[in-house]
Every structure is written in C-alpha cells, then in structure tokens.
Image: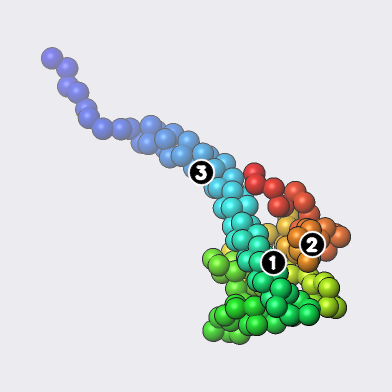
Amino acid sequence: MGRYTRGFSLIELLMVTTAIAILAGLAFPAYMDYTQRARRSDAMTALLRVQQAEEKWRANNPQYSADLTELGFTANGSGDFASPDGYYLLNVDAADAGSYRATATPDASGPQAGDSDCGTFAVNQDGAIIDDGSYAGASCWKKH
C-alpha cells in the first residue's frame, strides 16, 4: 500500500493563482468599461426629464426656463442639480424665448469623471443631440 498525500503542491497552487491573476487582469478593465457605459444612461434619463419639464413649462409660459428650480428640480447639498443616480450634474441655458440647451456633465468627484470617451451630454429644445465636438457624440447615446 502506498502512502497518499492530500492537498496541492506549491507549484500547483502558484499555477492556479497565476491563471486567476491573468483572468482578473483581462476581466477588470472590461468590467470597468461596461459600468462606465452603463452609467451614461443616467445622463440620458436626466436630460429626458429636463426636456419634459421644459415642454411643460413652455406650455404655460412665453419662453423656456433657464432655472432648474422653476422646472421642479431640487439642488443637492452643494447647490448642484444632480442626475437621478448622481453621476452627472445638470445645467440648462435658455438662449432666447424659443430655445434652450440642457447639459449633463460628469460629476468631477464621481466615477464618471474619468469618462474621456463621452464626457458631457447635451440636447436642445428640438430633442436633438448636440454633437458639435464639444459634447458627447451620437455613438455615446447608443445602447451598447
């Protein structure tokens, strides 16, 4: 009868650990990219809410509002208007009676601050995506 040893050898343990490290090294960046893309929906949702509020406001007033408080939004503790999940800060500019531009900028202290691919999202009174090079392009608005 032979003597059997149970367990793993050090070499086997190192091989498994190395394999796990390699897989994690590949998976983690892909996961971070996925979560960053998923958080972009927060900006889209917020801008849709701003558009709806602006249209409701315009139905009862002669011009669009440049004040998010008038539109029913509430500022957070630091005086900013945040998106529903808090990843973006909202702003609206009413250039004249018939137009406005609403923007959702990544919160500088949040996880979306590093989103160099898309950055700030913007729409206008027509519901059109503003894609003039300084805002997130059409590809950022797509659901991946």
Image height of 141 relative to 94, above or below = above
* Badge 2 element: loop
Q: Which mark is residue 126?
A: 2
Image height of 39 relative to 58, above or below = above
| Marks 3/1: CA–CA distance | 41 Å
Q: Nearer the viewer, residue 22 or 32?
A: 32
Q: Which mark is residue 24?
A: 3
Labels 1 and 2: the sequence-earlier one: 1
Could you classify mark 3 by the number of other residues whose Cα lies within 10 Å: few (under 14), some (14-19), or many (20 or more)? few
**x, y percent for residue 46:** 63, 65
Identity of the residue drawn at 67% across and 72% down: 56
Is residue 139 left or right of 81 when viewed as pictured?
A: right
Residue 120: quarter of image: bottom right
* Badge 1 element: helix
Q: Nearer the viewer, residue 93 or 5?
A: 93
Q: Nearer the viewer, residue 111 or 2?
A: 111
The kind of residue on which mark 3 rests is Ala
| Marks 2/3: CA–CA distance | 45 Å
The kind of residue on which mark 1 rests is Gln
Number of labels in the image equals: 3
Identity of the residue drawn at 73% across and 74% down: 58
For the C terminus, the quadrant is top right
| Marks 1/2: CA–CA distance | 9 Å
**x, y percent for residue 54:** 70, 72
Q: Nearer the viewer, residue 100 or 86?
A: 100
Labels 3 and 1: the sequence-earlier one: 3
Image height of 135 relative to 89, above or below = above
Q: Which mark is residue 51?
A: 1
Identity of the residue drawn at 63% across and 52% down: 37
The kind of residue on which mark 2 rests is Asp
* Badge 3 element: helix
